[in-house]
Amino acid sequence: MSTLSRRLLWLAFPLAAALLYVTLRDLDWASFWDALRHARYEFLLMTIPIASVSYIARGVRWGVLVRSEVQVSVGSVFWANMVGYMGNAYLPARAGELLRAGILGAKKGLGTSFVLATGLSERILDAVALVLIGSTALLLGGPLSPVLASAIRLMALGGAAALAFLLLAPFQERHLLRLIEAMPLPERGSRKIRETASRFLVGMRSLQNVRRMLLFAALTVLIWFVDGVAVVIGVRILSQSLDLGQALVLLAGLGLSSAVPSTPGYIGVYQFVAVSILVPFGFPREAALGYILLSQVLNYLVVTFWGLLGLWRINSGDRSATPAPET
């Protein structure tokens, strides 16, 4: 683990503890346990296959970037991806990102650096998509105060500008790296930023193909639509309701909060974000906390099942990589 990762981990635990304290302070524990006892767990079972569909679509989407260099089967990318998600659930410092890159890079002869670059690009593009989805959902969700509406429009505009920049960045790689070199930064910091930027640009080159870029965008929309439906169904476990727009706002908040230094499984961070978003939507604090806990348990079950199955498949000697034709 790098020095930076260790420092972030030391920050993550006190941050998680502080957020949990704020979330659980003055909670009516009797109402919380009563909500769990009377939960309609049949809805939980309905969300399991939906969550699996979302993870399959994520594997296909990552494969869109990876296959710009080598023709790799959807199954191979999916198994490596699920091992990575399982790693993120149980290991600190998002170690799952290194796991999935190392597994796919070693097994398929792609090289860990390239696979890690595509993973970084995927995560950054996903974050920008969440900003656009969340802000759009808020604008379409109902009446807002003029100040809040203006702020959300500005956020949406910023997200759109960031997306345009990310898509155009690979065509201006030389100029961007020169700009970073010209920044008045310490040598070590400048070098780290250049290395990260270079890695990101390597992954982004995969989307210079228009067909590949459109497929990536379509899969991103599908993924967040499926996840939104899962939330709409999932909150009914605790006899609550959300429309699709509200569900997307919650997903945007949870997704963006994953960038904060956190413990494995985002314990503390997710509870705070879910309660902060769901209570204004009319949820009792106890129901909001109960939902996010059940959602996290469900996610652990799904990623553990597919992740362990992925480890078994990978270790059994799955081989499916062949050189890709020029595109």
Image (cartoon, rainbow, N blue to C red):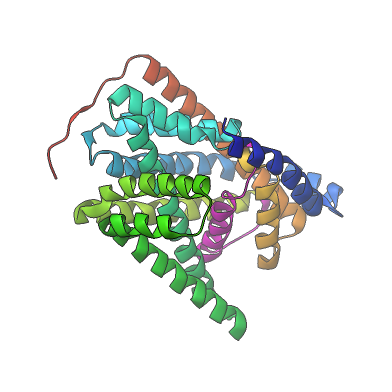
Q: Which residue is drawn at the image coordinates 28% and 59% (left, top)?
A: 172
Return the residue nearer the eye: 55 or 92. 92
Residue 262 part of the magenta segment: yes
User: Looking at the image, which residue sits at the far left?
Assistant: 326
Q: Is residue 243 left or right of residue 267?
A: left
Q: Which residues are magenta?
A: 238-264
**Residue 312 at x, y = what percent?**
42, 18
Q: Can the viewer see residue 145?
A: no
Q: Which residue is drawn at the image coordinates 38% and 63% (left, top)?
A: 163
Q: Is residue 97 above or below residue 279?
A: above
**Residue 271 at x, y = what percent?**
69, 49
Return the residue nearer the eye: 251 or 109. 109
**Residue 306 at x, y = what percent?**
46, 29
User: Looking at the image, which residue sits at the far bottom?
Assistant: 146
Q: Quadrant of the C terminus?
A: top left
Return the residue nearer the eye: 83 or 166. 166
Q: Which residue is drawn at the image coordinates 29% and 44% (left, top)?
A: 65
Q: Which residue is drawn at the image coordinates 46% and 44% (left, top)?
A: 50
Q: Is residue 99 above or below residue 269?
A: above
Q: Quadrant of the N terminus?
A: top right
Question: How many numbered discs sit on the rendered protein?
Answer: 0
Q: Is residue 147 above or below residue 293?
A: below
Q: Can the viewer see residue 276?
A: yes
Return the residue nearer the eye: 281 or 13. 13
**Residue 82 at x, y = what percent?**
44, 32
